[in-house]
Amino acid sequence: METKTLFLPYRWTVVIHETYHLYTNQEDQYAFAVLDEDLETVIAFSVNDSSVRVSSCRYDVKQTINVSTRVITIDQQPVED
């Protein structure tokens, strides 16, 4: 799986599939949404200095949040048609 690494506030990093997009909430610079190639939400979350809060996600999303390294990995791969 090819991935891309993006840097977030508070020294957090998110790793997502290369075809996915990361969007920042216009009203909250610490809130994000990962969208797939069809622009459907894979996961929505926010970060602060000490934690990550997932506000919504697909039922089948696979994620790893490593608090000690501040890395959020979304292991979700696109659905093949």
Image (cartoon, helix red, strand yellow):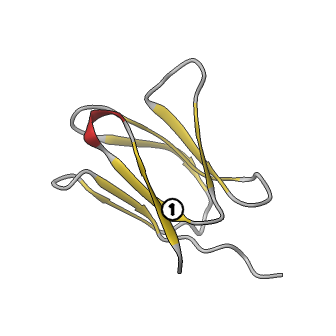
Q: Is residue 8 left or right of residue 62?
A: left
Q: Is residue 50 left or right of residue 6?
A: left
The residue at the point 75 percent across, 61 percent down is: 37
Question: Quadrant location of residue 19?
Answer: bottom right
Instruction: Give how far across and how far down residue 57 sits, in percent.
Output: 58, 53
What residue is shown with label 1?
16
Instruction: Give how far across and how far down residue 75 sits, in percent.
Output: 48, 71
Q: Which residue extends farthest top?
A: 27
- Tell me the SS state at disc 1: strand
Crowding near pointer 1: few (<14 within 10 Å), some, many (20+)?
many
The residue at the point 41 percent across, 53 percent down is: 14
- Which kind of residue does numbered mark 1 sit on? Ile
Question: Quadrant location of residue 53?
Answer: top left
Q: Is residue 47 above or below residue 76?
A: above
Q: Is residue 9 left or right of residue 42?
A: left
The residue at the point 35 percent across, 50 percent down is: 13
Q: Which residue extends farthest right?
A: 81
Instruction: Give how far across and how far down residue 28 sits, in percent.
Output: 50, 21
Where, quadrant-wise, is the C terminus in this rendering? Answer: bottom right
The residue at the point 43 percent across, 29 percent down is: 30
Across the whole image, how many numbered discs are drawn on residues?
1
